[in-house]
Amino acid sequence: MKNISSISIIIIGYNTCCQLKNLLYSINQVAGDHISEVVYVDDGSTDNSFEVYLEYKLKYKKIGKKLTKNMGRSFATQKGIDLASGAW
């Protein structure tokens, strides 16, 4: 059962290495105990986006999944939802 008082931030990315760093920095600026985790689904990137996510120091729990090929935003979003433990 998912924790009803927690929020999972789900990020879908495809070759967004540079933008991802800025996004993760912004997420780290958010204060609140209601955020339980950050889930990143890499939709088959050919740059080092997934490695950037894995190496970035977040103050929240991190979950990452790299798809072997680009499956599309809908598929990647559903994968992120499946990995998330938060209610929202």
Image (cartoon, helix red, strand yellow):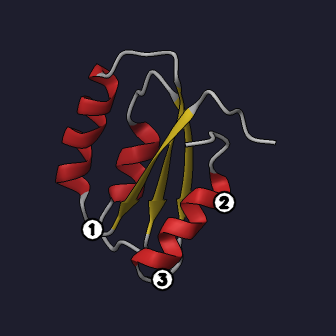
Vertical side of 32 occupied by 27: above or below: below
Cβ–Cβ under 8 Å for marks 1 and 2: no
Q: Residue at x 54, y 51 (%)?
A: 64
Cβ–Cβ under 8 Å for marks 1 and 3: no
Q: Is residue 24 left or right of residue 75?
A: left
Kind of residue indicated by mark 1:
Asn
Q: Residue at x 65, y 54 (%)?
A: 83
Q: Earlier in the sequence, mark 1 or mark 3?
A: 1
Q: Secondary structure at mark 3?
A: loop
Q: Earlier in the sequence, mark 1 or mark 2?
A: 1
Q: Quadrant of residue 50?
A: bottom left
Whole-percent x and y of residue 88? Answer: 55, 43
Q: Earlier in the sequence, mark 3 or mark 2?
A: 3
Q: Quadrant of residue 14?
A: bottom left
Query: What residue did someone put label 2 on?
Result: 82
Whole-percent x and y of residue 61? Answer: 56, 30
Question: Which is nearer the eye, 12 or 42?
Answer: 12
Question: Which is nearer the eye, 26 or 20?
Answer: 26
| Quarter of the rendering occupied by the N terminus | top right
Kind of residue indicated by mark 3:
Lys
Vertical side of 68 occupied by 80: above or below: above
Whole-percent x and y of residue 46? Answer: 33, 74
**Label disc, if present, on residue 69 of the rendered structure:** 3
**Label disc, if present, on residue 63 of the rendered structure:** none
Q: Secondary structure at mark 2?
A: helix
Q: Residue at x 52, y 22 (%)?
A: 34
Gap in angstroms between the C-alphas marked 1 and 2: 22 Å
Q: Residue at x 26, y 49 (%)?
A: 20
Query: What residue did someone put label 1 on?
Result: 15
Q: Is residue 17 left or right of residue 75?
A: left
